[in-house]
Amino acid sequence: MANDFSVLFQPLTIGRGMPKLTLKNRMVMAPMVTCFADSQGEVTQRLVDYHVERAKGGVGTIVVEAMDVDDQMLFHRLGIFHDRFITELEYLATSIKENGAAAIGQINQTGLRGNLPGPDNLTKAKTGKLVEAFAKAADRVKRAGFDGVMIHGAHGYLISSFLSPLTNHRRDRYGGTREKRANLSVEVIQSVRSAVGEDFPIFFRMNGDDFLPGGITVEDALVTASLAEQAGADVISVAGGVGIMAHDLSLGDNKSYFQMIMPMYVPRGCRVELGAQIKKKIKVPLSIVGRINNPYLARDIIAGQKADLVDLGRQLLADPFFPGKIASGQISDIRQCIACNYCHGKRMRAIKHVHCAINPEAGREAESKGIRPAVEPQKVMVIGGGVAGLEAAIWLAKRGHHVSLYEKGNRLGGQTLLAGLPPNKEEILTFPEFLTRQVEKLGVEIYLHHEVTPEFAIQQKPDVVIVAAGGRQIQSASIPIDPQISSIPAWKILSGGIDKFPQPVVVLGGGFVAAEITEYLCEKGLAEDITIVEMRQAIAFDMEPSFRQMLIEKLKNLGVKMITHFMIREVTATEVVGEDLRNKRPMRLLAGTVVIALGTESVPFPVEPIQKAGIKVFLIGDAKEPRGIAEAVRDGFLAGISV
């Protein structure tokens, strides 16, 4: 049956000793660094709240993020290298288990990823001490009350770097052949098994492919998986990609990183076939990760025997109750991850707490504990049907207020409707579709094709008005443009209806909108000769780094010319005239069409008359200040819980 998801909820028993561990379903929360630990590597209440919410959401197993086995710690990461960590880790493990999920602790040593010695620089004695450190860490995981331990052997960290021919050039027992490169993994697993006994499950996480020239391939992974199983691993967890090695990008760069934290450009379920190859070579269960954000995809992976478990990472940031909603048949209520990488791209790489662009509660779960129904339901008018206005309307309606939402266009979703139109970004559209379903289900009164004026707002006699009128493209008022040249706003191109442009094309502005518009024009065959000009030092500087590298490379392959440090002075009937900010030299570019992509400004809305009428006003989203989806959603949430 199309909506039969029972295979996802079949229990799975793992382990070699007695008693064995039974996982209540086939969904696993993948380990994801959050930066929620304190500066000493200790568990915080924020970290506990975050995991408890996902345990409540119905996932069968939670793998707590990497815990460092030695004291060479990185930014706000959990530690497991001393007994002092056990007490708080026990609190975390108990909290997870009390809310219905099995708790697995992941242990790791960062190696080259942490700018620590790698395979080529470790003596046998030091390597032996690291094996011992993993064993002691696993023992602490068991003593803290976890149900099992995961050894981190993926993504370019220490064990992974020993497995890779790119980073392991040793010619002793730890290098030279696939089998020898796997010896450290084998010794760690065996040492951990000795420390924790036969009755404590061991998960081994490994790369099925580094997606990096000279790195681990599936042929390497097949050997490693088999040896890991023989050494005592109870579950093989298959991942891919290598994190950025800042000291040597040939060992890990943005390309390999986006194979680790896959953006929306990468297809859903992108690791399934890789995992399926490895599954054929082992007898223990296999779990697979890789853009699994859809219940049908998750079900089909298990039903098709491609894997025994599905690892859910960012999807559980976006919607902690993904498993529970599947179980209860609430498929349309799932907030689907859009793989924008706000969480593990923009924020994590800036060493900030993990949050989610489309889930304003992620990483702030304590806030939700204080949300209560409205004591006195009020009449609230929301002006604007973009994501900020929709998020506000949802929370207002949930709390019992009487909500009416006015949108001047013919659809709800605002700028996200345009954001989902460039190549490979259609997944963004699932978010406004989700929000629209929620406001309809909650009984919000929706008025389309209705542009609100202050006078109309006052006539409706609301108690509160929330202005979410959105943003608009900055026009070229400060840049003289000859009316004889074809001049088109970028958003208008995405809206459709334009199928021919006088050539060559010059895009004014070099932010991410400009870069994506350029890609769109090239993909549609609308630009044979196109140039982007930007006054700053980089094109698409405001884009998530892995997205940016992928897009910039594609633009280069499409023959797009990109000019930075270009200050636009004027646009004549045939040229874009400017100067190079580095040396003040004049520059002139032939142009038949200019595409205006100079940024976003707030749509002006006069709130003073409404305030003078004694009505409380909230200004949110781009109406407050042009920013991104994350900020708009957060504004809407805060407004929705504040009335």
Image (tube, helix red, strand yellow):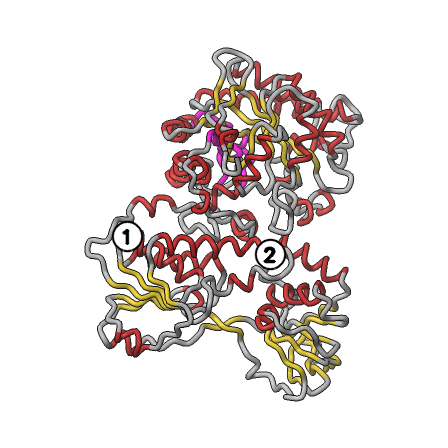
Q: Find residue 16 and report its horizontal and vertical position in percent.
A: 56, 14
Tell me which corner region of the image, top left, top right, bottom left or bottom right, holds residue 631.
bottom left
Q: Residue furthest left?
A: 376
Q: Check residue 82 for magenta coloring.
A: yes
Q: Residues within 10 Å of mark 2 (few under 14, many from 20)?
A: some
Residue at the spot of label 2? 425
Which quadrant of the view contains residue 576? bottom right
- At 64% across and 19% down in the image, what residue appears? 283
Q: Nearer the viewer, residue 350 or 481?
A: 481
Residue 626 lies in the magenta-colored region: no
Residue 321 location, x and y as percent? 42, 40
Q: Residue pushed farthest front?
A: 1
- Mark 2, secondary structure of its residue: loop
For disc 1, the neighbor class at 10 Å (few under 14, some 14 to 19, many from 20) is some
Q: Residue at x 64, y 48 (%)?
A: 266
Number of marks drawn: 2
598 to 119, vertically: above or below? below
Numbered label attached to residue 185:
none
- The amino acid type found where label 1 is placed reads Arg
Magenta part of the protein: which range?
60-85
**Location of residue 480 with respect to 333 vertically, above or below:** below
Q: CA distance from mark 2 to mark 1?
A: 33 Å
Percent from the top left, x then y, of residue 265? 64, 51
Residue at mark 1: 399
Quadrant hosting residue 195: top right
* Amino acid on which the number 2 mark rests in the picture: Lys
